[in-house]
Amino acid sequence: MIQVYILGKYPHSLYYLFSVVLLILKISYKWYTYCKNGWHYFMTDFCYFANIIANTYVMCYQKNEILFVISFLYAHGMLAVAIATCRNQMVFHSFDNMSSLALHSFPMIMLWNLRYHTMPYEATLPEANRVFLQFKPDSFFDIDLYTYILYPLAGYFIWAFVYYMINFVCMARKIREKNYLNLYMLQTKKN
């Protein structure tokens, strides 16, 4: 309810700070609870990487078109699909369910608001008052192959390499010995 209020009242300013701070608090709490339960290797999953990319763009590199496109594609692509595939549920009495749903949906809402509300609003402001880039490809043919395909794929493959190294090379023995869970182990147990 607070997110909806802030999104409606301050859609071009305070909302972005609220989303980032709330996400940092949720991830910190998840780290604490997941470490206690031996689930902390779940935090190497792609959704955390995509959230870091989106929040880095919003808080640090607001004029970077490549980072915006990557953030937008990850949020409205893999994170959106993950809501269904990971069966994220709105269970109000379960903090873990609510924070997982927020982890996958907040970047979508934040970047949708940015692209379709804040950027058009800022286009009416003088250049010195604009916080975010002005992103307006004029047509489908203005889409750059590197920006829309190669850079997002490169980011994904970097994440996949790091994920593989952590979960299957560097920490594989510890994960097996201590019976820790990660997404791969969870999926193989279900099948």
Image (cartoon, rainbow, N blue to C red):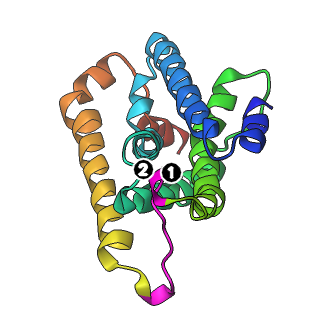
Q: Which residue is mark 2?
A: 62
| Label 1 vs 2, first from the N-terminus | 2
Distance Cα–Cα, label 1 vs label 2: 13 Å
Toward the top, the furthest residue is 36
The prevailing secondary structure element of the residues shown in magenta is loop
Toward the bottom, the furthest residue is 141
Using residue 109 as the reference point, say whether residue 180 is left or right of it: left
Quarter residue 18 falls in: top right
Badge 1: residue crowd in 10 Å (few <14, some 14–19, many ≥20): few
Amino acid marked by disc 1? Asn
Q: Which residue is mark 1?
A: 129
Quarter containing the N terminus: top right
Q: Are marks 1 and 2 in contact (CB under 8 Å)?
A: no
The tally of labels here is 2
Residue 86 visible in rendering:
no
Quarter residue 174 falls in: top left
Quarter residue 164 falls in: top left
Q: Position of residue 46 (x, y in %)?
A: 42, 45
Residue 68's disc number: none
Look at discs 1 and 2 and give the one toward the viewer. 1
User: Disc 1 on helix, strand or loop?
Assistant: helix
Residue at point 61%, 55% (across, down) = 118
Q: Position of residue 78 (x, y in %)?
A: 51, 56
Residue 79 lies in magenta, yes or no?
A: no
Part of the protein shown in magenta:
127-141
Badge 2: residue crowd in 10 Å (few <14, some 14–19, many ≥20): some
**Most foreground residue, 155 or 177:** 155
Q: Position of residue 62 (x, y in %)?
A: 42, 50
Toward the left, the furthest residue is 170
Amino acid marked by disc 2? Gln
